[in-house]
Image (cartoon, coloured by chain):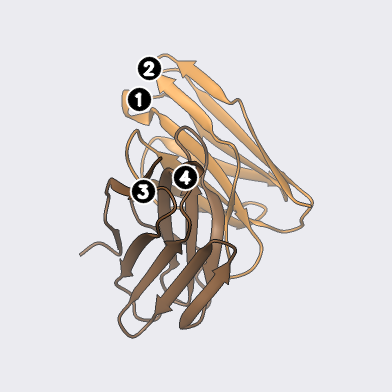
Amino acid sequence: QKEVEQNSGPLSVPEGAIASLNCTYSDRVSQSFFWYRQYSGKSPELIMSIYSNGDKEDGRFTAQLNKASQYVSLLIRDSQPSDSATYLCAVNMRGFGNEKLTFGTGTRLTIIP
Amino acid sequence: SQTIHQWPATLVQPVGSPLSLECTVEGTSNPNLYWYRQAAGRGLQLLFYSVGIGQISSEVPQNLSASRPQDRQFILSSKKLLLSDSGFYLCAWSVRRQGEQYFGPGTRLTVT
């Protein structure tokens, strides 16, 4: 089992629709969760962080965390062509004191105009 | 505000040649620093990280090494490059424990 698992896609979503990206992780004591966006040929850019169960909203983005089920998701509302990118899920796997993040392999999202 | 620099942006090197990639961070003190490699179409592989000057943790045994001679400077080196060293090299920094990491623009290395 991969430590952080994402569907590689590609995920195609019509413009204006909601894009839903999912991520599962294996370590129950994980504390911190992040979503990064990576455009082709560019470096990853942090777009959301979440630490507590529930939803966190920032503009068109909503991160959802369910520690009991060990999954974290990212919803993108009113999807735009500029949202087409690879989305990386990252998890701090071993709780307090661990300085590293474990990344999933990413989900490629394509927004269809 | 914090800024992270990497250079060079692109590099083409022959097999067996040495390598030195540099990363510097501005606007923060005592950051954690990280080197990642991303092979074409692949995920991020953590190579090294550092929590302070002279403190280097290696994640993957290979022909690469890292050094941190100053608080905000992180260097990735190799004495002899292999074809398999080709990839996109990313430096990142973080301050908070368990916290978010911020990436530099990256260096695209092609070993020929």
Mark sitting earlier along the chain (2/1)? 2
Which amino acid, mark 1?
Leu
Q: Chain of mark 1?
A: B
Which chain did the image draw in brown? A
Secondary element at tag 3: strand
Which amino acid, mark 2?
Val
Counting from the top left corner in percent of width and height, residue B46 is at: 43, 50
State left or right for residue A78 relative to residue A25.
right
The reply to whether discs 4 and 2 touch (Cβ–Cβ < 8 Å) is no
How packed mark 3 is, by other alpha carbons closer than 10 Å (few <14, some 14-19, many 20 or more), is: some
Q: Which mark is residue B69?
A: none
Q: Give the Cα separation between the discs numbered 4 and 3.
A: 33 Å
> Which residue is under mark 4?
B36
The answer to whether residue A48 of the structure is visible from this angle is yes
Name the residue: 35% across, 56% down.
A104
Q: Which mark is residue A14?
A: 3
The reply to whether discs 2 and 1 touch (Cβ–Cβ < 8 Å) is yes
Q: Give the Cα separation between the discs numbered 3 and 1.
A: 43 Å
